């Protein structure tokens, strides 16, 4: 239970378990968080928190918390070590491996739950201290299809509107977002919209909690998303619900889009998607006539080998009706990772430099090289993405890895392959605050910091940069992550570039580095962010108000200022069902868990809510297979199998089974998933592959 004594201090900060970033006040006594209150003054949550936010701080004093560096030991597994020993071993191995195999043979993996300051630092460390091209981050498993589609269509990777526009919309599409479980507090904006008369359309293979109250639910077959978007657009064109003036003046590509969707009649679309033709017609009727609308989407449409195509196909619904750049209109991707937005903006992606700049663009490279005071020629070009890095390790091309706040053994598809890769590394260093499943394969584990043990900023899913404040110091010998990175850089001979007094100085540098880029934070300071309860980027100078709503002047960030539209023919998933694997497998989240579970599997009351993964299947499929609720099942794909109990529910398509992915080893849904990548975003196809389900008779 909570300590009810009077706290020494109250610290205003944010819950970092999803991109809503609810405001929370922590009660701190004797360097411990002893309680909390939700913040009424933060306009997004207005005093509300979900179960994860309420329980988040119960992990802080878990006995597994790492308090010192550890070094792998053949007899005991790991032994305690000094920082000097941990740093020396890491730097010696970086130098040895890079001297023997080349700079790019050492890779870096970062995280999108980390602050903007750490994302910036990770990118700078990889390019200047490691001089490797191979840096990427776990947002590659999360937001990159949305990001790539936004860049293609609008030239900027951000939600078009602040969330306060949601209640002003008269129709809302929620495409592939289990919003109430993954982004819980945002549902209040949906309910407000409904109170204002909005119609809610939910598109998902599962009747998720948000779908249960929708006006229209479209049970799309996994992997058929672009076909459904095409089918709805076909209805808009047929009924003259498109905005021809907007399309002519502010977009390119409309003719090709209209041609593409011509054959997506309700009957044709039903055949592909499994959504009844009458529901497709109804979706057109709801989306077509209103003056205002909002499209919100998430991994359900993005986690595909056609993830970028899917997002662009849904964007066509927004653009065809011209409902963007004004009150109550727009689109937004739901960011399940705490800093899913900011984590992808400041240079820790393999193709990106600070300010959202392109690492292959000569001008961008020169700008950042000058800013950092290095030769442009010393900056690496685009390297491998997260899954490609794991593959390159498995293929013996990458020999060393430093990873921070990333648990690829749980979070990357085909975990058996990831395990084989980790076993091949000549050196593996991990920075984390718990011994996650991946860290068990490390040579050195460096005890880093939990969110409330450090300070910095994060950027919410609506593009608002908010400030996290430090409540307590790291326990024992654990260190702030930024300090570990800077210490390593110093030992690699690059102290001059990493001589920071703290994250405040890193933020100031990040903001200056971003000036002139699309992701411009140059008008922000920590003081301003706190005073204004967050600032929306782009914010180009101290007197700039920030930009809650994009495109109000109907100018897009593309070279000719027009939104770029493109239509896509439906193509099947990389692995479709067949006689051997006849059932569709899909995965996702439950409300009580966060990402790979490193934190939430250590919070008892969250574990109690959903203690182990269950295989959801429809009663019709269960009957067909002779399965009853609670039976023990073996679920197999071409890549592996897991054994777990059945949960027979009517809230899933009869041709599909669902298993949440937060667990490890023999309970890991990612033993089954397919690591085929989207060619543009390089996101894996988590959301659809083929499986078979068998009851284990003697369980
Ligand atoms: Fe935390 Fe998100 Fe829940 Fe808010 S909605 S309390 S940010 S997990």
Image: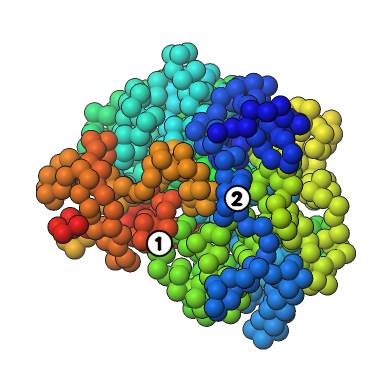
Q: Is residue 451 above or below residue 85?
A: above
In the image, 220 versus 230, the foreground residue is 220
User: As rendered, which of 397 and 20 lies closer to the eye?
Assistant: 20
Q: Residue at x 14, y 57 (%)?
A: 697
Picture quarter with the C terminus: bottom left
Identify the residue position indicated by label 2 in the image. Answer: 112
Q: Residues within 10 Å of mark 2 (few under 14, many from 20)?
A: many
- Residue located 55% across and 64% down the image: 439
Determine whether, in the image, residue 516 is placed left or right of residue 687: right
Q: State which mark lies toward you, 2 or 1.
A: 1
- How far across and down, in percent of the image, does residue 377 sit? 78, 71
Q: Earlier in the sequence, mark 2 or mark 1?
A: 2
Query: Does the image show residue 512?
Result: no
Using the rendered view, name the quadrant where residue 67 is placed. bottom right
In the displayed orientation, state which residue is furthest to the bottom: 100
Residue sitting at x 51%, y 48%: 602
Question: For numbered disc 1, what is the local secondary structure?
Answer: helix
Q: In the displayed structure, does residue 92 sit left or right of residue 695?
A: right
Asked if disc 2 and disc 1 are in contact, CB closer than 8 Å, the reply is no
Expressed as whole percent of the image width and height from the top left, the position of residue 231 reads 32, 37
> What residue appears at the point 46 percent right and 38 percent down from the top-left corner?
605
Q: Position of residue 624 (x, y in %)?
A: 11, 48
Q: Describe the element under mark 2 as helix, strand or loop.
A: loop
Question: Residue 336, image x and y in percent?
Answer: 52, 42
Instruction: Confirm whether residue 282 shows in the render.
Output: yes
Quarter of the rendering containing residue 398: bottom right
Front residue (pair 666, 560): 666
**Placement of 76 over or under 37, stated as above or below:** below
Label ID, residue 665: 1
């Amino acid at each position: 239970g909570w300590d009810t004594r009077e706290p020494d201090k109250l610290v205003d900060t944010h819950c970092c378990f999803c991109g809503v970033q609810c405001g929370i006040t922590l009660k701190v006594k004797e360097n411990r968080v002893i309680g909390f209150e939700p913040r009424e003054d933060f306009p997004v949550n207005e005093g509300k928190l979900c179960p994860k936010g309420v329980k988040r701080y119960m992990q802080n004093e878990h006995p597994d918390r790492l308090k010192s560096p550890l070094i792998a030991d053949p007899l005991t597994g790991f032994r305690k070590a000094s920082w000097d020993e941990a740093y020396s071993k890491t730097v010696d191995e970086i130098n040895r491996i890079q001297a023997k195999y080349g700079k790019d043979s050492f890779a870096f993996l970062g995280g999108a739950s980390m602050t903007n300051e750490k994302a910036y630092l990770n990118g700078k460390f990889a390019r200047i201290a490691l001089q490797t091209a191979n840096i990427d981050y776990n947002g590659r498993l999360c937001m990159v299809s949305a990001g790539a589609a936004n860049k293609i269509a609008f030239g900027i990777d951000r939600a078009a509107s602040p969330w306060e526009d949601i209640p002003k919309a008269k129709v809302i599409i929620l495409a592939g977002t289990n919003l109430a479980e993954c982004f819980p507090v945002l549902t209040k904006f949906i309910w407000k919209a409904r109170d204002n008369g909005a119609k809610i359309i939910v598109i998902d293979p599962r009747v998720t909690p948000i779908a249960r109250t929708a006006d229209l639910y479209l049970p799309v077959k996994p992997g058929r998303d672009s076909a459904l978007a095409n089918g709805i657009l076909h209805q808009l064109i047929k009924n003259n619900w498109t905005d021809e003036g907007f399309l002519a003046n502010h977009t390119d590509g409309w003719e090709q889009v209209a041609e593409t969707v011509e054959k997506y009649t309700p009957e044709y679309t039903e055949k592909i998607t499994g959504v009844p033709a009458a529901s497709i017609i109804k979706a057109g009727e709801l989306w077509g006539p209103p003056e205002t609308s909002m499209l919100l989407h998430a991994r359900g449409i993005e986690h595909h080998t056609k993830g970028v195509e899917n997002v662009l196909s849904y964007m066509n619904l927004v653009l065809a009706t011209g409902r963007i750049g004004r009150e109550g209109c727009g689109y937004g991707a739901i960011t399940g990772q705490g800093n899913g937005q900011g984590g992808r903006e400041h240079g820790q992606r393999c193709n990106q430099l600070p300010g959202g700049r392109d690492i292959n663009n000569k001008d961008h490279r020169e700008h950042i090289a000058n800013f950092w005071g290095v030769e442009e020629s010393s900056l690496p070009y685009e390297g491998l993405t997260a899954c490609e890095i794991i593959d390159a390790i498995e293929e013996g091309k990458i020999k060393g890895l430093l990873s921070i706040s990333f648990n690829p053994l749980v979070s990357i598809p085909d975990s058996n392959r990831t395990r084989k890769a980790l076993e091949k590394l000549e050196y593996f260093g991990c920075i984390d605050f718990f011994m996650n499943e991946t860290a068990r394969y490390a040579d050195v584990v460096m005890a880093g910091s939990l969110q409330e043990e450090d300070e910095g900023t994060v950027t919410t899913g609506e593009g608002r940069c908010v400030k996290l404040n430090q409540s307590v110091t790291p326990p024992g010998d654990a260190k702030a992550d930024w300090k570990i990175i800077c210490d390593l850089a110093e030992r690699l001979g690059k102290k001059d570039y990493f001589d920071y007094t703290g994250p405040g100085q890193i933020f100031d540098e990040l903001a200056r580095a971003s000036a002139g880029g699309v992701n411009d934070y140059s008008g922000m300071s920590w003081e301003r962010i706190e005073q204004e309860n967050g600032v929306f980027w782009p914010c180009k100078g101290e007197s700039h108000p920030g930009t809650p709503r994009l495109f109000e002047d109907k100018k897009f960030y593309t070279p000719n200022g027009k939104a770029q539209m493109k239509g896509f023919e439906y193509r099947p998933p990389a692995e479709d069902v067949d006689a051997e694997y006849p059932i569709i497998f899909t995965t996702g989240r439950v409300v009580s868990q966060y990402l790979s579970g490193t934190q939430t599997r250590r919070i008892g009351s969250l574990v109690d809510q959903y203690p182990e993964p269950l295989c959801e299947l429809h009663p019709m499929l269960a009957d067909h297979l002779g399965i009853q609720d609670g039976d023990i099942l073996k679920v197999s794909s071409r890549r592996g199998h897991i054994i777990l109990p059945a949960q027979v529910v009517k809230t899933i398509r009869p041709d599909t089974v669902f298993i949440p992915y937060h667990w490890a080893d023999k309970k890991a849904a990612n033993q089954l998933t397919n690591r085929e990548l989207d060619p543009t975003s390089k996101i894996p196809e988590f959301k659809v592959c083929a499986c078979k389900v068998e009851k284990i008779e003697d369980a």
